[in-house]
Amino acid sequence: MNYYVIYDGNCNLCVTLVQLLEKLDQGKLFRYAPMQDQETLSQWGVTPQACEQGMILIDANTPQQRWQGSDAAEEIGRLLPMGNIFVEAYRALPGMKWVGDRFYEQIRDNRYTLFGKRTSTYQSAYCVDGSCKPEHYQ
């Protein structure tokens, strides 16, 4: 399986989390594209308006299978080694999903104020070779 992570390449927090994920995964499961790369995103049918609702995770083998926002964060966590244990524990706690969703929304809507905005868009090394293009997975 391969997944495509769409993130805000101008957000300091988002880029830091992508860099952490790059180190953990080392390109085994995930490829990354900033939401600012409209050419690549349009090939996946992702609009700028959709990106404003939070990060997007696309199953590259079944592109209609997508997660967004806190659901994307949970799915990424679930896919990491031993991550499913933590995600299932989180989901099992009453009310935590609702709280997590609200927390994610607050961070998403205030990310530049809270964490700052980069002067240039971060481009992942796990995508610059064209491996994020939809035709790469066909």
Image (cartoon, grey):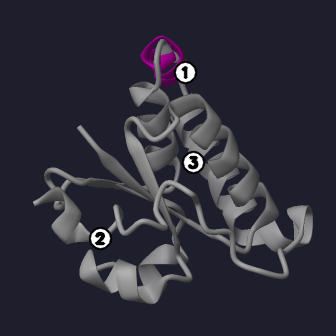
Label 1: state its secondary structure: helix
Q: Which mark is residue 90?
A: 1
Residue 90 in magenta? yes
- Which residue was labeled with disc 3? 101
- Residue at 42%, 27% in the rendered image: 78
Left or right of residue 67: residue 48: right
Q: Examine the residues drawn in magenta and state their main secondary structure.
A: helix
Residue 77 in magenta? no
Label 2: state its secondary structure: loop
Quadrant occupied by the C terminus: bottom left
**For mark 1, does the 10 Å Cα neighbourhood hold few (<14), some (14 to 19), or many (20 or more) residues?**
some
User: Residue 115: x and y, percent?
Assistant: 88, 62
Q: Which mark is residue 133?
A: 2
User: Residue 128: x and y, percent?
Assistant: 49, 67
Which amino acid type corresponds to the residue marked 1 in the rendered image?
Answer: Tyr
Q: Which mark is residue 59?
A: none
Question: Marks 2 and 1: CB-CB under 8 Å?
Answer: no
**For mark 3, does the 10 Å Cα neighbourhood hold few (<14), some (14 to 19), or many (20 or more) residues?**
few
